[in-house]
Amino acid sequence: MIVRLLVAAALLAGPAIAQDSKQAQDADQSGPPKRVRSILLYGKEECPKPQNEDEIVVCASGGESPYRIPKEFRNQRKDDAASQAWTNRVEMVEEVNRAGLPNSCSPVGTGGQTGCTRSAIRQWYQERLEQKAKDAAIP
């Protein structure tokens, strides 16, 4: 009985083994493509067609323009020290060292209160300029 079972299993596996070897031969004959082109497209460019059967063309979208900064990186404001001009740094140091002097907006010293209105107006004006710049950047 076991012998019959082994013979039946061998007969059933024979066509599958032959089929696998035929697929392997076909794959060896066709081989990889002779030429692969990778193309980066910008805007509304079309993907070119392959020039022959042995060529594969791979296309990817590169965005609006190769010379334009992507939208997620535009108009990012940097407040770190490296991105500040020296004049702004000097003005900040002078303002900090002015505590107690007239127009300093400080509770210490005489005349410190006179600068609070001035600093509020300066802050309002700066915010207004930034808002105008943002509005002008919107197409």
Image (tube, helix red, strand yellow):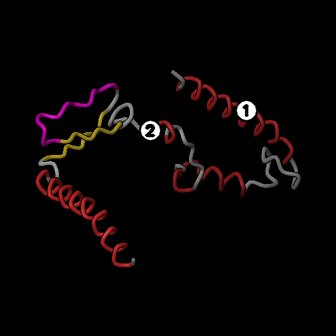
Does residue 74 lie above or below 4 as drawn? above
* Residue depth check, mark 2 versus mark 1: number of the one nearer the observer: 2
Q: Is 53 one of the magenta-colored residues?
A: yes
16 to the left or right of 84: left
Check residue 70 in the rendering and tell me which mark sits there, or answer none. Answer: 2
Residue 48 quadrant: top left
Does residue 106 lie above or below 40 as drawn? below
Q: Is 82 one of the magenta-colored residues?
A: no
Q: Where does residue 101 sit, x and y in percent of width and height?
A: 79, 51
Q: Are marks 2 and 1 in contact (CB under 8 Å)?
A: no
Task: Specify the amino acid type for callout 2.
Answer: Pro
* Residue, far top: 139
Please provide the residue range marked out in magenta.
44-55
Does residue 120 lie above or below 11 as drawn? above
> Which residue position holds label 1?
124
Near-viewer residue (77 or 83): 77
Q: Secondary structure at mark 2?
A: loop
Residues under labels 2 and 1: Cα distance? 31 Å
Near-viewer residue (50 or 126): 50
Q: Residue at x 62, y 29 (%)?
A: 129
Q: Residue at x 42, y 38 (%)?
A: 69
Task: Specify the amino acid type for callout 1.
Answer: Trp
Near-viewer residue (125 or 23): 23
